[in-house]
Amino acid sequence: ISIFFIVVNEFCERFSYYGMRAVLVLYFKYFLNWDDDFATTIYHTFVALCYLTPILGAIVADSWLGKFKTIIYLSIVYAAGQVIMAISAIHDITDANKDGVPDNMTFHVALSMVGLLLIALGTGGIKPCVAAFGGDQFQDHQEKQRGTFFSIFYLSINAGSLLSTVITPILRAQECGIHTKQKCYSLAFGVPAALMVVALIVFIIGSGMYNKTAPQGNIMVKFCRCVGYAIKNRFKHRSSHFPKRAHWMDWAEEKYDKLLIAQVKMVLKVLFLYIPLPMFWALFDQQGSRWTLQATTMNGDFGALTIYPDQMQTVNPILILIL
């Protein structure tokens, strides 16, 4: 039963993240009045932060707070960031002369940057924890059930992504405002913010049913120390007087157990396959920036159906769910 709360939490969180991200570059361009290049730069800086902060989240969870508390605390930070983004998109806050244009754009920019930083910290910080926390709910003999969970978990991620990238562009296209009507970015950010609050509440409701493991030390730190010691020891004994070893990581045997060294060797082999991945992701994430901006110059009307520029990003989750 505890798995239900984790899956629903993940669905709502992914809806929140991808929904906000879908309209972000258009918010930069049309609300903050940034040019395409600067909007793209800030967009990709934000995305990069979202995928750097998982390292911090993993260290905090494994070494200090544990997965459960890390998810709770950083989800609060995450929700706060989403709420701040929704507030930053309300143009009436600084529109004293009621002309539909914010009088203090610096305020909106500052609020947006604070919101995005909190979101990056929150979404990145919980990213390495939620799936692992779900895996912790199963015993060692429940391999089949664990595999089923991860399939459903991945399905919930892409279902949340698909629905959000369909719905939030529609919300953005609505007009709202007290004095003058504008594209409703506040609503497009507000709904993801509400979903993040729901995600947090759902996760807390299931807290009494979870299997919570205590922090056991961060494996990433052990990994780095083991590699560092092997390199240091190898150069320290590079003289021909010392016999060669089968693998350079074997120079860590004086300090680290053979199981850890074997696992490090396997990780290093896998990392070799990761070399081309930065190029792939650099191109893939253009969907939310250059592709979306290019789509603004195109006619999205197909008879009674209108495809908004920021709905271009639905193709990926659709194909994942189909395949």
Image (tube, helix red, strand yellow):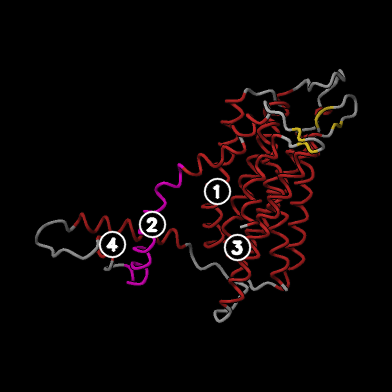
Instruction: Name the residue nearer the viewer: 92 or 1.
Output: 1
User: Bounds of the magenta span?
Assistant: 256-279
Residue lying furthest right:
178
Instruction: Decide which of tag 1 and tag 4 comes sooner along the chain.
Output: 1
Instruction: Decide which of tag 1 and tag 2 comes sooner along the chain.
Output: 1
- x and y percentages locating residue 265 in the rendered image: 34, 63
SS for tag 1? helix
Instruction: Decide which of tag 3 and tag 4 comes sooner along the chain.
Output: 3
Residue 131's tag is 3
Q: Give the residue number, with chain letter if any, for mark 2.
A: 224
**Residue 140 position (above or below residue 104):** below
Label 4 Cα crowd, 10 Å radius (few <14 / some 14-19 / many 20+)? many
Separation of marks 1 and 4 at Cα, in angstroms: 28 Å
Amino acid type at image mark 2: Cys
Separation of marks 1 and 3 at Cα, in angstroms: 16 Å
Instruction: Name the residue nearer the viewer: 181 or 151.
Output: 151
Separation of marks 3 and 4 at Cα, in angstroms: 30 Å
Label 3 Cα crowd, 10 Å radius (few <14 / some 14-19 / many 20+)? some
Q: Give the residue number, with chain letter if any, for mark 1.
A: 53
Which label sits in the foreground, 4 or 2?
4
Amino acid type at image mark 1: Thr
Q: Give the residue number, with chain letter if any, for mark 4.
A: 249
Separation of marks 1 and 2 at Cα, in angstroms: 18 Å
Numbered marks: total: 4
Which label sits in the foreground, 2 or 3?
3
**Residue 120 position (above or below residue 111):** below
- x and y percentages locating residue 248 in the rendered image: 25, 60
Predominant secondary structure, magenta span = helix
**Residue 280 position (above or below residue 2):** above
Amino acid type at image mark 4: Met
